[in-house]
Amino acid sequence: MNIIEIENLTKRFKDNVALDNVSLTIQRGEVFGLLGPNGAGKTTLIRLLIGLIKPTSGTARIQYNGLGPFDINKDIMEIRKKASLLPQEADVYENLTAKENIMYYGQIYGNVPNGEVRRRTEELIDMIGLRGRENDITKEFSGGMKRKVLVARALVMDPDLIFLDEPTTGIDILGARTVRNLIKRLAKELNKTVILTTHDLSEVEELCDRVGILVKGKLAAIGSPDELEQQFTRAHLEDVFIGLTTGEGVLEEDLTTKKRRGFISRILRRR
Ligand SMILES: Nc1ncnc2c1ncn2[C@@H]1O[C@H](COP(=O)(O)OP(=O)(O)OP(=O)(O)O)[C@@H](O)[C@H]1O
Ligand SMILES: [Mg+2]
């Protein structure tokens, strides 16, 4: 069952085509990864789907269990009732505590009763590893701790559809593992649909049922990590990614793994 059907979606910022005629479908309960170099259009696609910006042309329809389909061009309020976003660039309310940040979000978004928001907030504080710091003002938090609050905030309204734009960026190793386990649980146990972006290919391989690789606004490839490796006859998703984003030329047989790793980190560090 498809939860999202994207049809010829295009977004231009003046002369810059950020997203170029993208069509794809996403199934309910799927963890879908969006990959691509900086500026490829990943955040733009997410912002379009949750209605923060309007398409230049094309559309997408979102259908929840028994509700919809809703069109991103006209039904954004309906879409937002069951969708939430962890933005790539977001900040906590620094004068609120971690708990207040999470609860406040739960109270203003979605349709969750207050008692349930309180219960979910406590649960998320434990799940995300913030217990003991939940009553501290977030102004004093480290970057990664703030990011954890934002992940919890995105989940408190009990969304069916969750957009996570670089959820683990800046979070320490243990915290990133916690977030990844949480994402797996959301999809596998609770049948939530998760769309995430990341520059960490091992994260994609661990989490994603399917990935879409965006290159200069175009969908260059789509499939499970295994399918992409087979389709492009590469042993690793990393090689598929490099081939698609730089042209086949760089994938000389004699290029050592170390060199390739250096190459990809250079691509990915271009911010
Ligand atoms: N509000 C905006 N106004 C003008 N141009 C924009 C705007 N938002 C994005 N763009 C442009 O659209 C293109 C795609 O940007 P986007 O943020 O979607 O990339 P991304 O794939 O998320 O990259 P990153 O990996 O760096 O987060 C870029 O060329 C960017 O400069
Ligand atoms: Mg982005």
Image (cartoon, rainbow, N blue to C red):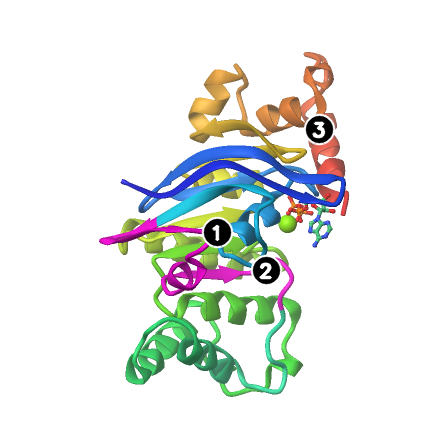
Q: Is residue 189 above or below residue 258?
A: below
Mark yes or no: residue 41 visible.
Answer: yes
Q: Which residue is mark 3?
A: 258
Q: Is residue 65 magenta?
A: yes
Is 192 left or right of 36, judged from the image as shown?
left
Q: Secondary structure at mark 1?
A: loop
Image coordinates of residue 31 in percent, x first then y, are: 40, 44
Q: Is residue 227 above or below residue 64?
A: above
Q: Secondary structure at mark 3?
A: helix
Mark 1 or 3, nearer chain start:
1
Question: Type of residue at label 3?
Answer: Lys
Q: Which residues are magenta?
A: 63-90
Quarter location, residue 14: top right
Bin the neighbour count of mark 2 within 10 Å (Cα to Cα): few under 14, some 14-19, many 20 and up.
Answer: few
> Which residue sits at x=45%, y=59%?
76
Is 182 left or right of 96, judged from the image as shown?
left
Which quarter shows the N terminus?
top left
Q: Which mark is residue 73?
A: 1
Quarter location, residue 223: top left
